[in-house]
Image (cartoon, rainbow, N blue to C red):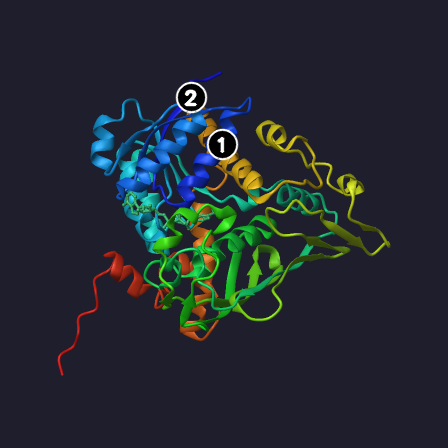
Amino acid sequence: MAERVRLAIVGCGGMGRRHLAGLGELARSAHDAVELVAVCDLDERNAAALADEAGQLLGQRPTVFTGLERMGREAEGLEAASCTIETGAHHRVAAALLDSGLHTLCEKPLALTVRACDHVIAAAQRSGRVLSVAENFRRDPINRLVRALLDDGAIGDRQFIMETAVRGRDTLFITPWRHQKLSGALTLDAGVHSADILQYYFGPATSAYGQTRLYERTRVRRDTGGPGGFYAQWAADLPASVEATGEDAIFGTLTFEHGALGQWVDHYAGHGQPFSHRMVFGTCGSIAAPGDRNGRPVRLTLDDGADIADERILDYAPSYRLDPAAAALFGDERPWTYDLDFPAIDRKLLALEYHELATCVRTGRPPEVDGVVARRDVALVYALFESQEAGRPVTIAEVEAGAVDAYQRPIDAHLGLVPRPVATAR
Ligand SMILES: NC(=O)c1ccc[n+]([C@@H]2O[C@H](COP(=O)([O-])OP(=O)(O)OC[C@H]3O[C@@H](n4cnc5c(N)ncnc54)[C@H](O)[C@@H]3O)[C@@H](O)[C@H]2O)c1
């Protein structure tokens, strides 16, 4: 087996803790490929707490750093880093990691705007290092199965996809920074997962017509543990409420290459009964996908009368086969369902991200979600915002090229990526 890749986790908040759990999962498998040697956070307490947890989980305490420069000088033989800091600093920190010669696994979204994504992609090109983006949802075996059903023609040609989720009321979603336009609105932070799934199932989107809203201007602290309880240690630091500036609902109509259509609603301020569904329609049937990280079965309904939500679905997806690491972690090469709790699912998917990173580093194979794929996901989210600003449908190409950027410009100015507008004297 190739030598393990020596890694640092940069960003020791909630997601840093989840990444550590992923590394623990990988270490317990026959596919261990990564050695955690350093952790880094501006907040030394967060870094030290993660190092302690790593010492217990992995039997080796990584060295604690509070800045990249010292880490670069002192962490011996470091080859790679994960960037698990707030989205607003991804473009600076991921680019700095790449420029310092480290292969980088960057959390989604790749960066806060399309221009900020370009900044990271340019660093990857300059350095020749691997840039992989941590899109975990598509690695869920059930999403792999849906993709295989589509590719194998189970429902004929792709025609229409509906991705809808309405929930959240006025609850503060994990951290205050997720409610601010200038640090990453919820609709980008969580919405980018949907953008990735939509394009993973249907290929690149080409245009979008969207509307966006900020419904809940005050967000109230309620569930303080965050997904899987990973954020519980910061619960006491959460304010009772925050004033939101970032939009909390997006509504869009999409066109994909080859003419298929999509309808996408990501509404994080919905009241009453939470609702979500992901339905895919083709020229001879439909697929009801169960969503992400729940292991529930897929339902296939065909014009010939077949209505299948059990093991027989595998007959319609002959190409479906997990890679060996995924098959080992989920206990089956062709799972059609699984029964695991959220933390177990989460760490398996993160373990797979690290396994892929190590494979790319050692073999030169490109990652599945590289900078270009991840920027397309960010562009699809912003297409809805730019469409709202422009009052017309926009093409993804013009969003990617920065030709329509009225919504993102103030964010880019805040990040220092474009000049700040000069105040005109009266
Ligand atoms: N893939 C997923 O399912 C998923 C889930 C949650 C979060 N995320 C992503 O992970 C990232 C982190 O989110 P989080 O919830 O862990 O945030 P968080 O606020 O809990 O933690 C961020 C940490 O980064 C540290 N930090 C900030 N700037 C830094 C810098 N320049 N150098 C070193 N450390 C720095 C902070 O001190 C903090 O400890 C975000 O981009 C988010 O979108 C992904």
**388 left or right of 256 in image:** left
Write the residue at 47% across / 66% down. 384
According to the picture, the residue beneath numbered tag 1 turns out to be 356
Farthest residue, direction top = 1
According to the picture, the residue beneath numbered tag 2 turns out to be 4
**Position in image of residue 186 (x %, y %):** 44, 60
**Position in image of residue 243 (x %, y %):** 36, 69
Which image quadrant is residue 339 in? Answer: top right
**Position in image of residue 150 (x %, y %):** 68, 47
**Position in image of residue 101 (x %, y %):** 29, 31
**Which kind of residue does numbered mark 1 sit on?**
Glu
Which image quadrant is residue 84 in? Answer: top left
Residue 311 in view: yes
Comparing 423 with 274, the one in front is: 274
Farthest residue, direction front = 236
Write the residue at 45% across / 55% down. 224
Instruction: Point out the tag, 2 or 1, that comes first from the N-terminus.
Output: 2
Neighbourhood count class around disc 1 (C-alpha, 10 Å): few under 14, some 14–19, many 20 upward = many
Instruction: Name the element at disc 2.
Output: loop
Comparing 366 with 357, the one in front is: 357
Instruction: Name the element at disc 1.
Output: helix
Write the residue at 84% across / 51% down. 306
Neighbourhood count class around disc 2 (C-alpha, 10 Å): few under 14, some 14–19, many 20 upward = some
Q: Is residue 154 above or below residue 383?
A: above
Label ID, residue 180: none
Which callout, 2 or 1, points to the residue nearer the camera? 2
**Which kind of residue does numbered mark 2 sit on?**
Arg
